[in-house]
Image (cartoon, grey):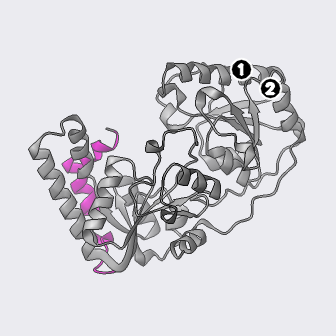
């Protein structure tokens, strides 16, 4: 529903007219990306060979970075209407026409070895774009893992089942997906889709360290999980604040429309990178941002509770994991905060280099 508003014909016409000069020339594009989520990778590739498919946000990104752009907004409205009435012949005809038009645009623009990259291959829009790419003769479709999957989750909710290849975060995730039934030849380890943020501010002294809780939208996943999540957050905030430790809460984007906590919980409205810059210790349940904080040299603590069917991150990833049921939970957190050394930024190749290497495997 949020994205369908961009399918308005007036908005589409305005975006098309403003970006006409960004339209790719014949047979020039090697890398098509649905959206600009993977900006670190996109900006590392030759601009003349890279094209973004999307709406107004992506158009602005392409203007700023001198990239090629293909508008694809009218599909949102058709897909939204189709979810409400999938028996409509008119909607099916409109969807077929849109797929055909996008497929033709891709066919005109692509080089022989062109690929399409998506941020997930589970949602209707991304699957429709993949179908269009295949119809255009694009060589390969690739889905890049955007976040950590839990082994206790049902396999059908994972990405990676529809695209030709799935680039995963690490070998642990790859092995888990193989156990879930994915074809091993379909899975390639690339690492995180972005470069670790490099904080300019060193880790503060133990007595001055600031804690940030990475929020997650558990309040939308059933009443039992919602209540348990609120209890955990409230417990940690109340007790760490009583101990004289500054604690802040960074909501997940899906939480921002929900008034979950009162004013006693200090909420941040900052980017992830700024949050990593300004805080020292990060706490969450299953957030992938814990891994990003760890890779940036900050301290990450996972709170484990069976209600959330979470894997224990400390088993494979160098993150501190503590059970919420631990009677010494707050003391354990305080101990980690005080004893954590200023670990160095995790050294690795850039996301762009890892992407190219994974493509060639």
Query: Where residue 136 sits in the image (x, y, percent)?
Result: 26, 70
User: Which secondary structure dominates the residues rendered in magenta?
Assistant: helix
Q: Which residue is mark 2?
A: 329
Residue 194, image quadrant? bottom right
**Which contiguous range is marked in magenta?**
2-29
Q: Is residue 55 left or right of residue 269?
A: left
Asked if the residues shown at circle 1 and circle 2 are in contact, with their CB atoms under 8 angstroms apart, the answer is yes
Return the residue nearer the eye: 54 or 110: 110
Q: Is residue 84 above or below residue 344?
A: above
Would residue 133 be seen by someone viewing this image from the given angle? Answer: yes
Q: Which mark is residue 302?
A: none
The span from disc 1 to disc 2 (Cα, nearest Å) is 10 Å
Quadrant where the C terminus sits is: bottom right
Residue 197, image quadrant? bottom right
Tell me the crowding category of disc 2: few under 14, some 14 to 19, or many 20 or more residues within 10 angstroms, Cα based: some
Q: Residue at x 18, y 52 (%)?
A: 95
Q: Residue at x 51, y 48 (%)?
A: 180
The mark nearer the N terminus, 1 or 2, is 1
Return the residue nearer the eye: 184 or 276: 184
Return the residue nearer the eye: 288 or 269: 288
Q: Is residue 140 above or below residue 235?
A: below
């Amino acid at each position: 529903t949020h994205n369908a508003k961009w399918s308005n014909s007036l908005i589409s016409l305005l975006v098309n007219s403003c970006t006409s000069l960004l339209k790719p020339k014949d047979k020039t594009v090697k890398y098509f990306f649905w959206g600009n989520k993977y900006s670190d990778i996109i900006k590392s590739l030759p601009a003349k060979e890279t094209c973004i498919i999307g709406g107004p946000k992506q158009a602005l990104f392409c203007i700023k970075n001198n990239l090629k752009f293909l508008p694809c907004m009218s599909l949102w409205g058709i897909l939204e209407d189709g979810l409400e009435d999938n028996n409509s012949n008119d909607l099916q005809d409109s969807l077929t026409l849109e797929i055909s038009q996008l497929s033709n645009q891709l066919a005109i623009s692509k080089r022989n070895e062109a690929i399409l990259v998506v941020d997930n291959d589970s949602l209707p829009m991304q699957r429709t774009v993949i179908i269009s790419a295949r119809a255009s003769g694009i060589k390969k479709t690739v889905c890049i893992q955007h976040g950590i999957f839990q082994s206790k989750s049902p396999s059908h909710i994972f990405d990676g089942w529809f695209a030709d290849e799935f680039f995963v975060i690490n070998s642990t995730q790859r092995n888990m997906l193989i156990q879930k039934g994915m074809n091993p030849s379909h899975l390639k380890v690339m690492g995180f889709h972005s470069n670790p943020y490099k904080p300019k501010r060193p880790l503060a002294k133990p007595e001055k360290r600031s804690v940030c809780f990475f929020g997650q939208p558990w309040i939308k996943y059933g009443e039992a999980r919602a209540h348990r999540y609120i209890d955990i957050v409230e417990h940690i905030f109340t007790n760490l604040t009583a101990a004289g430790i500054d604690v802040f809460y960074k909501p997940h984007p899906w939480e921002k429309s929900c008034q979950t906590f009162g004013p006693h919980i200090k909420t941040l409205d900052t980017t992830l990178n700024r949050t990593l810059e300004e805080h020292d210790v990060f706490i969450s349940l299953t957030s992938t941002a814990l891994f990003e904080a760890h890779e940036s040299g900050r301290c990450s603590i996972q709170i484990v509770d069976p209600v959330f069917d979470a894997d224990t991150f400390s088993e494979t990833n160098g993150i501190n994991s503590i059970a919420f049921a631990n009677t010494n939970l707050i003391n354990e957190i305080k101990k980690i905060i005080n004893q954590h050394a200023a670990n160095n930024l995790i050294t690795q190749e850039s996301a762009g280099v890892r992407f190219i290497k994974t493509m060639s495997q």
